[in-house]
Image (cartoon, grey):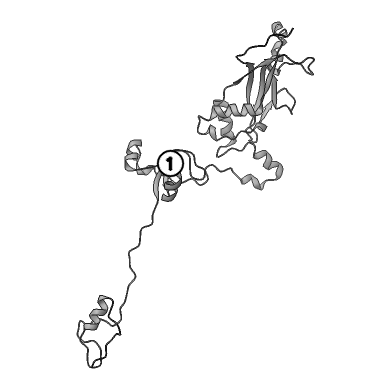
Amino acid sequence: MTTPLVSRSPACLTCLRRVIQPLSSNGSNIGAGALPLVQVRTKTRYTRPKDRGVVVRLLEDIPKFGRKDSIFRTERGRMRNEWYPKKLAEYMTAARFHELGLTHDDIGERDPTFGLVDVAEAEQGPEEFEEISRPKIIAITPEKAQTILTTLVPETLTFHRKPIPAPPAPSRPAVSPLIAGSAAADAESKQTTLLAIYGSVSADDIVSHIKELLVIDVEGSRIVLEPEQIRFLGLPEDVDRIKELGRFEIEISTGGFGLEPVRKVIEILPSAEGFPEAEA
């Protein structure tokens, strides 16, 4: 009785064919078409294609990725779970490309440096670092910030405040620097008594007003402006707010070496409530 080649039934077609081959007297396979006893499995050439992600278009500026309207590929999970539910980006389908008049040639690359403050100045000394980092301009040079502040911010910024009677015997004339210069040549201006205001117009108020004006501009909205960058001309260095009606000149520092500050005029006018009646 012939001894079986295997102790269990073959599990593949090659092994089954080998078992049913006629054997010679020494137990080896015979025949010209005999299959080899050793099964050789070669490495498959099929490789699964790498997922390149999905093409998206940003609807908002996203730091470390790019500004609004940028088109690039990103991970499907990030788009599905983060950006699309928050309406930060949209899927760029073939129909969407056609609607926007774009082609696949308009697909760019992610900008990993977008929205990051330049940290090269960290290698400078403490004094140089403090000077360079003011103001903190995000992806905008001081020269560009100076141009934006000069062109987009009007020459005169107007504020309205409720006037109140001026305090008696002021330590200094209650006249703003710009009015003081013109009052010397105008007799009528000399007789004008400026009133104090309820509250004040501070550097924070000026910064907030400028940001409201720049929010409509893509690059202007990326300027980080701080109250420390506002300086009132003709007044003591420690003055950071105005408490009376009038016109006052200010300087806005852009933080660049050798750049002249941007000059604007602050005009404080009576509010719609008008002047209060004089007390008896």
Q: Name which residue lies at 47% across and 38% down.
A: 60
**Residue 27 lies in what quarter of the image?**
bottom left
Position of the C terminus, as image quadrant, is top right
For disc 1, the neighbor class at 10 Å (few under 14, some 14 to 19, many from 20) is many
Q: Find the residue positioned furthest to the front.
A: 280
Q: Tell me: residue 180, above or below residue 232.
A: above
Position of the N terminus, as image quadrant, is bottom left
Q: Name which residue lies at 30% across and 81% down.
A: 38
Q: Which residue is mark 1?
A: 89
In this orientation, does residue 206 appear?
Answer: yes
Q: Tell me: residue 18, above or below residue 222.
A: below
**Residue 271 lies in what quarter of the image?**
top right
What x and y, as percent, mark residue 231? 68, 28
In this orientation, does residue 75 appear?
Answer: no
What x and y, as percent, mark residue 24? 22, 91
Left or right of 193, for residue 50: left
Amino acid marked by disc 1: Ala
What x and y, as percent, mark residue 31? 19, 85
What x and y, as percent, mark residue 180? 72, 14
